[in-house]
Image: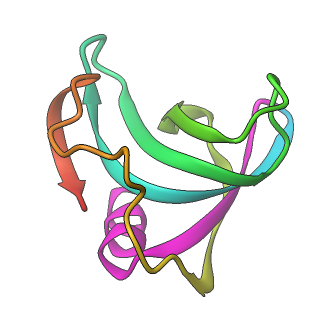
């Protein structure tokens, strides 16, 4: 899955996946390892289910992601509030 996430980030392609019982569509920006040792994805959710009912920045535990699909649709710009070097990660595999 690391290679798939890396490709989606490098190509700035939307990804769709199941997470905690709901389908989500996100713009992947960064993936790496959290301070708890989990493989995580920082992404901006643009569509789909959200337990809070809100779209926006989320940190996903990759081990809970299923049925992942890289979409053909690109997101052309970085989110203005995105900053490199995610503080929620102790190591980063790839980021925009």
**Protein image colouring:** rainbow
The picture places residue 88, in percent across and down from the top left corner, at 29, 22
Residue found 15% across the figure and 38% down from its top:
85
Residue found 21% across the figure and 24% down from its top:
87
The picture places residue 1, in percent across and down from the top left corner, at 43, 57
Looking at the rendering, the stretch of residues picked out in magenta corresponds to: 1-20
Residue found 68% across the figure and 48% down from its top:
66
The picture places residue 19, in percent across and down from the top left corner, at 72, 38
In this rendering, is residue 78 above or below 63?
below
Residue 91 is left or right of residue 26, and the answer is left
The picture places residue 90, in percent across and down from the top left corner, at 15, 24
In this rendering, is residue 87 above or below 4?
above
Q: Is residue 4 magenta?
A: yes
Which image quadrant is residue 2 in?
A: bottom left
Residue 1 is left or right of residue 37, and the answer is right
Residue found 80% across the figure and 22% down from its top:
52
Residue 95 is left or right of residue 65, and the answer is left
Which image quadrant is residue 68 in?
A: bottom right
Q: In which quadrant is the C terminus drawn?
A: bottom left
Q: Is residue 3 magenta?
A: yes
Q: Residue furthest top?
A: 36
In this rendering, is residue 23 above or below 9?
above
In this rendering, is residue 74 above or below 65?
below
């Amino acid at each position: 899955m690391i290679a798939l996430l890396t490709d989606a980030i490098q190509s700035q392609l939307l990804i769709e996946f199941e997470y905690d019982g709901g389908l989500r569509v996100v713009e992947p920006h960064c993936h790496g390892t959290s301070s708890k040792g989990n493989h995580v994805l920082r992404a901006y959710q643009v569509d789909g289910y959200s337990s809070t009912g809100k779209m926006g920045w989320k940190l996903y535990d990759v081990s809970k992601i299923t049925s992942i699909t890289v979409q053909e649709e690109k997101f052309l710009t970085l989110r203005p509030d995105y900053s490199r070097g995610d503080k929620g990660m102790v190591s980063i595999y790839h980021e925009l």
